[in-house]
Every structure is written in C-alpha cells, then in structure tokens.
Amino acid sequence: MTDKIIVLVSCGSRKEARKIARALVAQRLAACVNEIGVPVGSTYRWRGKVESAKEFLLLVKTAKRRFAAVRDAVRKLHSYEVPEIIALPIAAGSRAYLDWIAESVKAS
C-alpha cells in the first residue's frame, strides 16, 4: 500500500470540471487530474426521488496527506450542495510515477 490516493469528483459541466482540475493542480493539491471527456450517466437518490444526470468525472492523483485540502478546495469551487469527493487508495504503482506525485504535491 502506498500513501497516494485517487479522489473521484463528479461535476455537472465540462467547464466546472476543468476549473476544479486546473485549480487543484495550480495549488499543488494534485499532481494530475484526468477529466473524463465524455459525460457519464449517474443515477442517484436526492431528496427522496430517484434522479439521473450527465456528469463529468475527475480522477485526482494526490497524496493522502493532501486529502483534506483537496476536499476543501473542491467544496469551495463546486456548484453541488453535496459534491462527490471519494478517496481510493493506490495499492501499488510505478515507483517513478508515485515519486512524481509526491514531488508535485509538495508544499512550496
């Protein structure tokens, strides 16, 4: 197990996804953010009703110690009342890539 994580964030528009991605990388909260370019279909329960929406998924690569800052930045920039912010552990990976993540999210 590594100390690196992938944070999933779904957004209501491509513009919002891009804004969040750029902010996370610019603030050194993420080494890389993949924007899934094709909308994903989401079905969910909201306020007692089953809803469906098209969303854009972000895959945020960062270190576990940066999760709280990532979460707070997403909450600040996101239009949803309750945005999806889910961290998944990276069990293993290329040492060079994991080192690059660590270097990229170091506080300056």
Image (tube, helix red, strand yellow):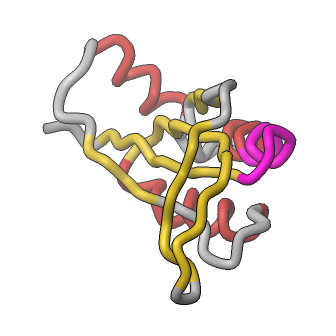
Q: Nearer the viewer, residue 38 or 57?
A: 38
Could you say where residue 29 lies in the image, as x and y percent from the top left?
Answer: 59, 46
Q: Residue furthest bottom?
A: 48
Q: Residue at x 53, y 62 (%)?
A: 84
Q: Is residue 53 left or right of residue 104?
A: right
Q: Residue at x 79, y 46 (%)?
A: 13
Q: Is residue 101 left or right of residue 69?
A: left
Please say if 68 is above or below 30.
below
Please say if 60 is above or below 104.
below
Q: What secondary structure prevails in the magenta region? A: helix
Q: Residue furthest left?
A: 1
Could you say where residue 77 lies in the image, as x and y percent from the top left?
Answer: 78, 62
Residue 108 painted magenta: no
Could you say where residue 9 lies in the image, as x and y percent from the top left?
Answer: 56, 51
Q: Nearer the viewer, residue 33 or 99?
A: 33
Region in magenta: 12-20
Number of dots carrying numbers:
0
Q: Is residue 87 left or right of residue 93?
A: right
Q: Residue furthest right?
A: 15
Residue 13 painted magenta: yes
Q: Is residue 101 left or right of residue 99?
A: right
Q: Residue at x 34, y 11 (%)?
A: 96
Could you say where residue 58 lies in the image, as x and y percent from the top left?
Answer: 59, 39
Q: Residue at x 57, y 57 (%)?
A: 70
Q: Quadrant of the N terminus?
A: top left
Q: Nearer the viewer, residue 68 or 58?
A: 58
Q: Residue furthest front?
A: 50
Q: Quadrant of the C terminus?
A: top right
Please say if 50 is above or below 95.
below
